[in-house]
Amino acid sequence: MKRRRFSTIMAGTATAMATSCRGPGSASTLRWKGVLFNAEVEFTLEGLPARDAEVLTRSCVDEMVRLEKIFSLYQPQSALCRLNREGVLDAPPAEFSELVDLALEISAETGGVFDPTIQPYWTWLGETLAAGRKVDEAEHRRQLARVDYREVECSSGRIRFARPGMGMTLNGIAQGYITDRIAALLRAGGARHCLVNLGEFAAIGTQADGRPWEVAVRGLGPDVAGPLRDGALAGSSGSGHYFGVGSRANHLINPRDGRSPDPGRTGAVHAADAVTADALSTAAAVLDDEAARRLEAIRPGVRVRIHSGDAGIGIPGGNTVS
């Protein structure tokens, strides 16, 4: 699964907001940058009066901080950490129930290739390889047997693991979920020209001058490079984090066999919403090419592209993410 550690946005220190406009009350271009999930995130908002854009941006930042406190794998009092610690969570936050339910739905649709219960196996493998130990096959099988999305019971009133020793990560889907939430907040606030980049991209309309947003996937060819308008794009690659010195095992793991794909392999997914693109890009990156492309049949509008080599997703001329 993708691993981007959730880290709090420090308003005023880890964020920057730049606004340009022609005069009082005129339309502006606002560019906000901050840190979320231990990575730089940003969005560009065009066509609103500067004051309106700044107020709307601060609302978005507050929402990202709030959701981080629910989904964080590292903040001890987050809903996710409490579930992993106790094995059950009564009266979960509505957003947490919604996201867990979405994750389990996509797990079923992918036949378990996307599976948020990979967390205990991920932790065990990382600790084993970081300590320089060889992977014992019997222990590998025992640890992998703890991974099964079908053993998670989820309702609005309670989330529970059916077996002891289970755990969950939402790092392969939470960024897409938050991206969609921020995009919805921006739309409700009157935004009609915006590009949100929280590790996954969501475009609201076009740029104010009518040009589409340019989001490129290096190495994947012009059919995957922008334009992007009123849609989402996400990418997953194992090249961001390796387990142990000299190991090819990386942070992307196929829950079916516990193996990592080639670290140079990138799965890129276009979809109507970022949460779908996020989860399916994780699945696409661990499957072979033919199986990855079959993910397109899961939901309308999904488009999958695969590249093996040095690739990344980003805004042309800007930072790439994977």
Image (cartoon, rainbow, N blue to C red):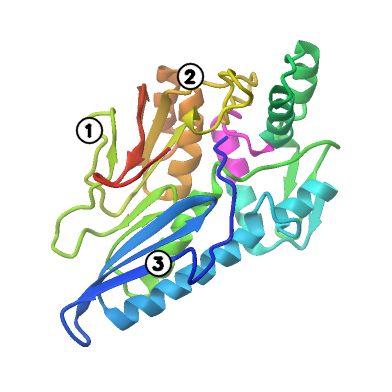
**Where residue 22 sits in the image (x, y, percent)?**
15, 79
Q: Is residue 279 left or right of residue 214?
A: right
**Do the numbered discs 1 and 2 sit on residues whose CB atoms are within 8 Å?**
no
Residue 166 - label: none
Q: Residue furthest bottom?
A: 24
Residue 262 - label: 2
Q: Earlier in the sequence, mark 1 or mark 3?
A: 3
Label 1: state its secondary structure. loop
Q: Residue at x 59, y 36 (%)?
A: 107
The answer to which quarter of the image holds residue 132 is: top right
Q: How many marks?
A: 3
Label 2 amino acid?
A: Asp
Q: In this figure, which residue is indicated by the disc labeled 1?
A: 223
Label 3: state its secondary structure. strand
Q: Residues within 10 Å of mark 2 (few under 14, many from 20)?
A: some
**Do the numbered discs 1 and 3 sit on residues whose CB atoms are within 8 Å?**
no
In the rendered image, the vertical position of residue 121 relative to residue 314, given as above or below? above
**Where residue 156 sits in the image (x, y, percent)?**
70, 59
**Where residue 199 sits in the image (x, y, percent)?**
44, 48
Asked whether residue 302 appears in the rendered view, the answer is: no
Asked whether residue 80 appears in the rendered view, the answer is: yes
Residue 16 - label: 3
Q: Residue at x 56, y 19 (%)?
A: 248
Q: Residues within 10 Å of mark 3 (few under 14, many from 20)?
A: few
Label 3 amino acid?
A: Ala
**Dominant SS in magenta:** helix
Q: Is residue 36 left or right of residue 296?
A: right
Residue 112 lies in magenta, yes or no? yes
Label 1 amino acid?
A: Asp
**Which of the image's four quarters has the C terminus?**
top left
Magenta range is 103-117
